[in-house]
Amino acid sequence: MWEWALGWIAPAATMIAAMMTAANAGARTTGWGFVVFTVGSVAWSLAATYSHQRNLLLTNLFLTAVNLIGVWRWLGRQARHEDGSIKAVRKSQAGGTPTLFSASAAVGASVIDASGEKLGVVVDLMLKRDQRGLAYVVIAEYELGGVGETLRAVDPACIEFTDGVAHIKMSRKELDALPALQTDDWPSALPPAAQRIPGASDRA
């Protein structure tokens, strides 16, 4: 009976944990993914003990230790860092003129236009090394099923980060009119064709 139950619990926990960590949905989701991974590796260890599979047992005892480190890192240290950035953003908002946003939260944020339509996802923020501020924001537009993607560099002046969402001050047509970036070769500065569109802020 126990062997039968472990035979289902171990692979189910492993698959669920893999989806949770691959989702990259924040420190806590990743941390709980490692918790589920730990459940899976412990179940595999017990199953290996019942079936006398020494190699499987040793492998999953090692993976249990690795998973526990992941729990400590993501539900401990990384979660505290995430809490710190969230509190800093809230303090800046309480001042009446929000001045801060979390770069880690911005990456992966949905890009929403004025009508509420999702246009894409923030892939990265390119910072000016010797100056203050952002050089440009890289946005990915995914094709049906998320198989293909088109990357575009957007002027930071056209984007406002609030509540974990990137509000863009242009329409889908205007975004699609920007030049596409090569996946593995981004520009050293915002392309001239991607400069802020006149009147875009008035339409947002």
Image (cartoon, helix red, strand yellow):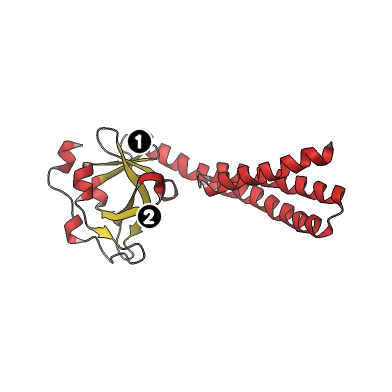
Q: Is residue 187 left or right of residue 163?
A: left
Could you give the CA–CA distance between mark 1 and mark 2, rounded to whole angstroms? Answer: 27 Å
Question: For mark 1, what is the residue?
Answer: 95
Q: Amino acid at mark 1?
A: Gly
Please state which amino acid type lies under the numbered disc 2. Asp
Q: Is residue 133 visible?
A: no
Disc 1 on helix, strand or loop? loop
Left or right position of 40 against 98: right
Asked if the residue under mark 2 is in contact with the one under mark 1, i.e. CB atoms within 8 Å, the reply is: no
| Quarter location, residue 4 | top right
Residue 56, how many percent across, how many down?
Answer: 78, 56
Q: Is residue 166 visible?
A: yes
Q: Nearer the viewer, residue 90 or 188?
A: 188
Going from the N terminus, do you reach mark 1 or mark 2 first? Answer: 1
Vertical comparison of 118 with 152: above or below: above
Residue holding disc 2: 124
